[in-house]
Image: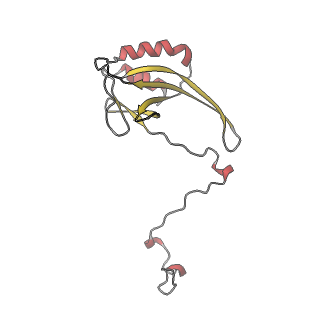
């Protein structure tokens, strides 16, 4: 989700709710511990230089069960972070503690709730690395009838 979309959605809800990837809610007494921009300058395995910029939002909860963030409070955090975020409109990435480590998640919005979404890794230069495309799966019924491999006396089975 783009940062501008996050701000738009915050402006249109009365209660802030986050759902984890397993559908369980993040406890309603969560805090936003920080908001900022992370810029990653790197080179991929195909030797292409890249720059990735994301707005990060770290959510955390403790024993303070009376704590509740309102949309107005989140906007005050967004406004305080504005000089850091600037005019760009990067993707937002949420950091949230799962079990023993911090996870990084994308963000979606569904039925009035913000939903943490899993992120995946991938090779950015598959042609350079020689990574083959996935093999095409065929059903046995789609194989040619005269296929030597599947002939009854071919000894392939």
What residue is shown at x 30% (from left), y 22% (from top)?
15
Residue 149: image x %, image y %?
53, 79
Q: Quadrant of residue 75?
A: top left
Q: Identify whether 141 is placed above or below 45.
A: below
Q: Quadrant of residue 37?
A: top right
Residue 36: image x %, image y %?
52, 21
What residue is shown at x 29% (from left), y 20% (from top)?
65
Task: Pick whichever, 49 or 65, lies toward us.
Answer: 65
Task: Pick whichever, 67 or 118, lies toward us.
Answer: 67
Looking at the picture, the colour scheme in use is: secondary structure
What residue is shown at x 69% (from left), y 39% (from top)?
48
Residue farthest along the bottom direction in this orientation: 153
What residue is shown at x 50% (from left), y 15% (from top)?
81
- Left or right, 136 with reference to 96: right
Q: Identify whether 156 is placed above or below 9.
A: below
Residue farthest along the right direction in this orientation: 47
Residue 99: image x %, image y %?
40, 36
Residue farthest along the left direction in this orientation: 66
Q: Identify whether 121 is placed above or below 41.
A: below
Residue 122: image x %, image y %?
56, 45
Tally the marks.
0
Task: Pick whichever, 31 or 86, lies toward us.
Answer: 31
């Amino acid at each position: 989700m783009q940062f501008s979309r996050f701000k738009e959605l915050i402006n249109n809800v009365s209660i802030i709710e986050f759902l984890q990837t397993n559908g369980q809610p993040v406890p309603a007494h969560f805090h936003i511990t920080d908001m900022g921009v992370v810029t990653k300058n790197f080179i991929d395995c195909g030797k292409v230089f890249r720059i990735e910029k994301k707005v990060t939002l770290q959510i955390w909860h403790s024993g303070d069960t009376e704590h509740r963030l309102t949309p107005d409070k989140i906007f005050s955090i967004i406004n305080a972070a504005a000089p850091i975020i600037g005019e760009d409109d990067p993707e937002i990435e949420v950091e949230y503690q799962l079990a023993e480590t911090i996870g990084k998640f994308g963000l979606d919005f569904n039925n009035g709730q913000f939903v943490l979404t899993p992120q995946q890794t991938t090779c950015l230069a598959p042609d350079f690395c020689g990574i083959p495309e996935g093999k095409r799966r065929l059903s046995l019924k789609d194989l040619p009838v005269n296929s030597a491999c599947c002939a009854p006396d071919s000894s392939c089975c």
